[in-house]
Amino acid sequence: MSLDRCLPTLLLAAAAHVAAAPAWAGNAFSSRIYITGATVIHPEREADAAIQRDATLAIHDGRLEMLESNVTLELPQGATVIDARGKWVVPGLVDGHVHFFQSGNLYTRPDAADFSAVVPYAQEVARNQARLEATFKIWLASGVTGVIDVGGPFWNFDVRDHANHSAMAPRVAVAGPLISMVERPQLDLGDPPIIGIETAEAARALVARELERDPDFIKVWFIHQPGDDLAAQEAIVKAAADAAHAAGKRLAVHATELVVAKAALRAGADYLMHSVFDQPVDDEFIALMKARSAFYCPTLFVVTGYPLALSGQWRATPEEARRADPEILAAMDDLEAIPKDRLPERVAKLMAAKTLPAPPRIAMENLRRLQAAGVPIVMGTDAGNIGTLHGPSIHREMQLMREAGLTPQEILRSATTNGWHALRGTPDRGRIEVGKPANLVILDGDPLADIANLARVHRVVRGSFVDDPEALMESIR
């Protein structure tokens, strides 16, 4: 029968609706999916219009065909039916800042803490490459159906290709090697993720190499140190921006100080990859953000993830215990077992001090001001850095965003509507509307009452695929 949205009432087939649930595998395919009795949240709408109760969703061949409230419906034989009474449905989440070449464990950034005497860096990178399919499943199990990898080796492009050809992967956008103001030889295994650039000409040449692989972003690692010529550095960023924009690509920039972030925006940045951590943002910065229509990705937790992990004080949250890669969780416990004479000097000092890092208060205050000013915020974790694990680290990040003063709906919008705008410019996937691709997370708790309820993932629906998070995690153990 037709599922025209104008039909006020559809026939009930009780037997079909209460039929025994299928034996869920980690990932099931169905050309017709029905979700009944749900509370649907539309993050992009005003608060009084964001909630749609007692909704029935019909998905056919991967697209939402019907979304109606207070209807009954005859369900065809063979359809997948999800009883969502007492559950909430939100768009699939996006992490706007990840790195697949990094794992989050102690061994993943030898330029920050060199444990290569314990685990050679080449071994760590090989593990990350071999573990990609598990990492994809971990993201899905956390309700994350899209990620933006903002910089890594040229094999980053193979990660995107792998994800695009996998039935068990989020949508992936990537950048290639970072155009950097500093060298990081510790990370160079022949395909470095960070390449030192000293001139505008060299920046344009590296952009040209990356454009051959059709990047979603060009990324600049804008590190400004005392004595550096800021104007000369800004010229390098502008050269990269101009080359990227000429090819229809966006420029993402790592810029963590106010003066550097302003320079990045003047040079053409479209996506600032971190908070301004050093001082309060001002009207000039806000005006530059708005003039560029730039996205702001705060990454609040990562700056405390490093000292927590390297001082031996990192402990898995309940969400991480259930949803993180068990291999990485095991490696996070290695620190106490490493002989003291094999510890990097920085780590030995942190372990001796045992000082708990403070939350990044300036960055949190800046986030609150930018949200109030209407700057588009994209939730992102910088996952892969030491202490910031792929997947469930989103909940540490969103808790800090809540402590910064954002409402649950603002945080949800940053992780859905805004995230999908940033990810390859695919905003349709951030909306639950008829005709749009099905991209949904079904939750066992109301995220508008408590943003922590985003961790209570019941099912993930991606087109014609239905993911069971428990089965996904069981498949990688």
Image: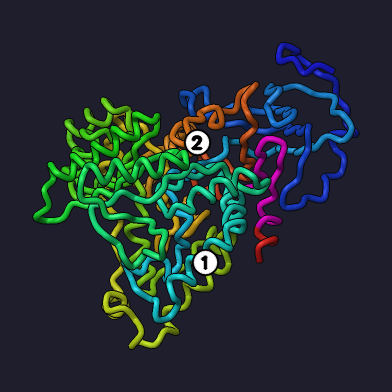
The image quarter containing residue 41 is top right
Q: Is residue 73 above or below residue 256?
A: above
| Residue 183 vertical position relative to residue 285 in the rendered view, above or below | below
**Where does the N terminus fall, quadrant-wise?**
top right
Q: Looking at the image, is mark 1 or mark 2 earlier in the sequence?
A: 1
Instruction: Answer whether residue 307 is visible to the viewer in this image.
Output: no
Indicate the secondary structure of the residue bearing disc 1: helix
Q: Which contiguous range is marked in magenta? A: 457-472
In the rendered structure, the answer to whether residue 261 lies left or right of residue 463 reads left
Q: Please name whichever residue, 63 or 336, is drawn nearer the observer in this view of the structure.
A: 63
- Of badges 1 and 2, the one in the foreground is 1
Where residue 362 appears, as percent x and y from the top left, is 23, 48
Query: Tag 2: residue type?
Result: Thr
**The one of 187 and 314 positioned closer to us in this rendering:** 187
| Residue annotated with mark 2 | 416
In the picture of the structure, the residue carrying the numbered disc 1 is 126
Expressed as whole percent of the image width and height from the top left, the position of residue 234 reads 18, 41
Question: Spatial distance from mark 1 to mark 2, Cα to Cα?
Answer: 32 Å
Q: How many marks?
A: 2
The residue shown at (78%, 33%) is 31
Label 1 crowd bin: few (<14), some (14–19), many (20+), radius 10 Å = few
Q: Residue at point 67% right, 55% down?
A: 472
**Which residue is painted at 34% across and 29% down in the image?**
246
Judging from the image, what secondary structure is the residue with disc 2 in?
loop
